[in-house]
Image: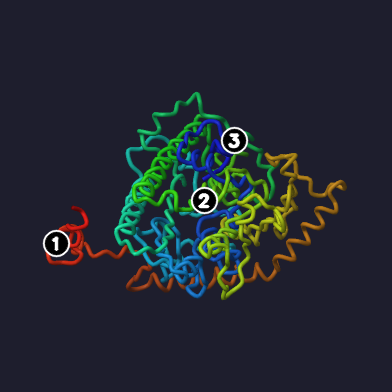
């Protein structure tokens, strides 16, 4: 979800009334970032409070180790009933990672099949990579995998909330409702495609940047996203953006259903709601699509905290990241007190920021990328107004995001910012050991390619999650069954 399309973040076209209401009544973080601009590593860092590389998350096919404590483990130990409805892209045999309930399956493979292979070179394209077919095929579609999945996520989340209320045990709950939309492909339900028209769809703020004028990683992504195989016309861009907006509006309706359910069970005013995402989408900006880069449309995410009884509506300009949600959740759950942590985390609690205090906030975020298009770890530091990008063998990149929010001028190498660039370069080497990081990624790739080949030989035993339900105990089965809907206890309660 690219925050730039949302009206609370300056968007003018996309209509998302439920998200807009959350933002209007809540705290909007204007500069929130993911710590890795693709799905699984971003989610692993979100759940662990650690930088992706610290849990061995180098691409979309790394196992999330079971021994890594997540916020779900801590919340569960603090007495919370925890549930995941939707996508989390866990890789490995552990498909819960602390969640007590998981009420849907996932979307993507839980094995090592999507392991990146740097030995293929920086411009190699695999059939399972992104391609421009997602743009060329964009438009109204009667149904799609994403829409089908998110409808199930919505129904399961709302049902779980009702079930939680029916238990009446007084336990607090944490529910992660995790949609795949508006992830590509850009296939929009006709009902929501029709609320937009072609002539209202805005063009990218920054047009296609010629290949020879791109930064090194954007040059590589031209090939690893398949731009070299297909021509994209202005009409294709407009259609894809219209479909994206339509999916956003469709998704907003699903978010509204979850919010309505909270109100129905009487928990709306007693629940902190956080809206965020694992990465953004370039949506044709700079001639680029999808994510996988450190440009703002890819690496920035929405972050909205809605808790009117706790926080006044405000906008926060300081830099934050998904890492910071882990300690924030725990501090909320502990009524302002953090539980004792069994391992170090990299995030910082945002409770003070959310209340409007910037005292002691470091105002720095870090992000990594090691997947398709990379040949060594690509590293980002945003501190204050400055964003610095480092990659072994790549020319450095430095942007002043206050003066140049569209990232049009690379200041690296200019005498006027020499000290700033030197300090941010040193910050990269304080945060990471790039040569050791590179060696660890290559070793992991080789190991996982071998394991995937071995596990594909003979009988295949997938790790993919299947929701655990005993349908024989649901609805009206046995009048004498304590779980039955016609039990005396239930009937007495409903009279």
Tag nearer the camera, 2 or 1: 1
Q: Quadrant of residue 422?
A: bottom right
Measuring from the top left, give residue 266's x and y in whole percent.
37, 50
| Mark 2–mark 1 distance (CA, rounded to whole Å) | 41 Å
Provide the secondary structure element on which disc 1 rests: loop
Q: Which residue is at a point 30% across and 62% down the rendered structure image?
A: 167
Provide the secondary structure element on which disc 2 rests: loop
Q: Which residue is mark 2?
A: 277
* Among the two numbered marks 3 and 1 on one chain, the one whose residue lies closer to the N terminus: 3
Task: Give above or below for 31 relative to 44.
Answer: above
Q: Which mark is residue 10?
A: 3
Provide the secondary structure element on which disc 3 rests: loop
Task: Give above or below for 349 relative to 401.
Answer: below
Q: Residues within 10 Å of mark 2 (few under 14, many from 20)?
A: many
Q: Residues within 10 Å of mark 3 (few under 14, many from 20)?
A: few
Q: Quadrant of residue 246?
A: top left
Please give left or right for residue 179 compared with residue 428 in the image.
left
Tag nearer the camera, 3 or 1: 1
Please give left or right for residue 217 compared with residue 474 in the image.
right
Q: Residue furthest left?
A: 479
Measuring from the top left, give residue 267's x and y in whole percent.
40, 52
Image color mode: rainbow
Q: Which residue is mark 1?
A: 477
Task: Give above or below for 207 relative to 282.
Answer: above
Measuring from the top left, give residue 437's x and y in whole percent.
65, 68
Q: Residue furthest right?
A: 415
Q: Which residue is at a point 46% across and 42% down the rendered structure image?
A: 133
* Among the two numbered marks 2 and 1 on one chain, the one whose residue lies closer to the N terminus: 2
Q: Nearer the viewer, residue 163 or 12?
A: 163
* Among the two numbered marks 3 and 2 on one chain, the one whose residue lies closer to the N terminus: 3
| Mark 3–mark 2 distance (CA, rounded to whole Å) | 17 Å
């Amino acid at each position: 979800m690219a925050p730039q399309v949302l009206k609370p973040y300056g968007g003018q076209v996309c209509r998302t009334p439920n998200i807009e209401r959350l933002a209007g009544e809540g705290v909007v973080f204007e500069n929130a970032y993911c710590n890795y601009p693709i799905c699984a590593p971003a989610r692993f860092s979100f759940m662990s409070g650690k930088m992706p590389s610290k849990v061995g998350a180098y691409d979309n096919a790394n196992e999330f180790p079971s021994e890594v404590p997540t916020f779900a483990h801590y919340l569960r130990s603090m007495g919370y009933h925890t549930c995941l409805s939707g996508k989390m892209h866990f890789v490995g045999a552990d498909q819960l990672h602390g969640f007590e309930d998981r009420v849907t399956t996932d979307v993507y493979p839980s094995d090592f099949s999507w392991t990146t292979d740097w030995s293929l070179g920086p411009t190699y394209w695999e059939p399972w990579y992104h391609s421009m077919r997602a743009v060329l095929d964009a438009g109204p579609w009667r149904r799609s995998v994403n829409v089908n999945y998110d409808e199930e996520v919505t129904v399961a989340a709302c049902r779980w909330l009702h079930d939680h209320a029916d238990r009446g045990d007084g336990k607090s709950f944490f529910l992660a409702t995790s949609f795949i939309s508006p992830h590509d492909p850009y296939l929009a339900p006709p009902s929501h495609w029709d609320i937009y028209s072609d002539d209202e769809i805005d063009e990218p703020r920054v047009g296609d940047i010629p290949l020879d004028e791109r930064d090194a990683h954007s040059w590589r992504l031209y090939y690893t996203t398949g731009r070299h195989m297909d021509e994209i016309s202005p009409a294709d861009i407009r259609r894809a953006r219209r479909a994206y907006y339509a999916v956003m509006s469709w998704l907003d309706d699903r978010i509204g259903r979850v919010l309505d359910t909270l109100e129905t069970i009487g928990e709306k005013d007693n629940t902190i709601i956080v809206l965020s995402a694992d990465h953004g989408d370039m949506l044709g900006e700079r001639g680029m699509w999808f994510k996988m880069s450190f440009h703002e449309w890819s690496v920035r995410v929405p972050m909205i905290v809605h808790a009117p009884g706790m926080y006044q509506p405000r906008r926060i300009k300081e830099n934050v990241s998904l890492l910071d949600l882990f300690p924030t959740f725990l501090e909320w759950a502990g009524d302002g007190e953090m539980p004792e942590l069994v391992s170090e985390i990299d995030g910082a609690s945002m409770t003070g920021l959310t209340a409007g205090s910037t005292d002691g906030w470091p105002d720095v975020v870090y992000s990594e990328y090691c997947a398709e298009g990379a040949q060594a770890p690509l590293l980002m530091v945003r501190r204050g107004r400055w964003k610095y990008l480092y990659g072994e063998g790549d020319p450095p990149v430095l942007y002043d995001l206050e003066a140049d929010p569209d990232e049009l001028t690379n200041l690296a190498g200019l005498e006027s910012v020499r000290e700033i660039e030197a300090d941010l370069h040193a910050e990269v080497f304080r945060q990471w050991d790039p040569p050791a990081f590179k060696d660890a990624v290559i070793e992991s790739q080789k190991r996982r390619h071998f394991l995937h080949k071995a596990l594909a030989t003979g009988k295949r035993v997938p790790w993919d999650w299947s929701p655990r339900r005993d349908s024989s105990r649901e609805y009206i089965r046995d009048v004498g069954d304590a779980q039955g809907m016609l039990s005396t206890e239930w009937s007495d309660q409903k009279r």
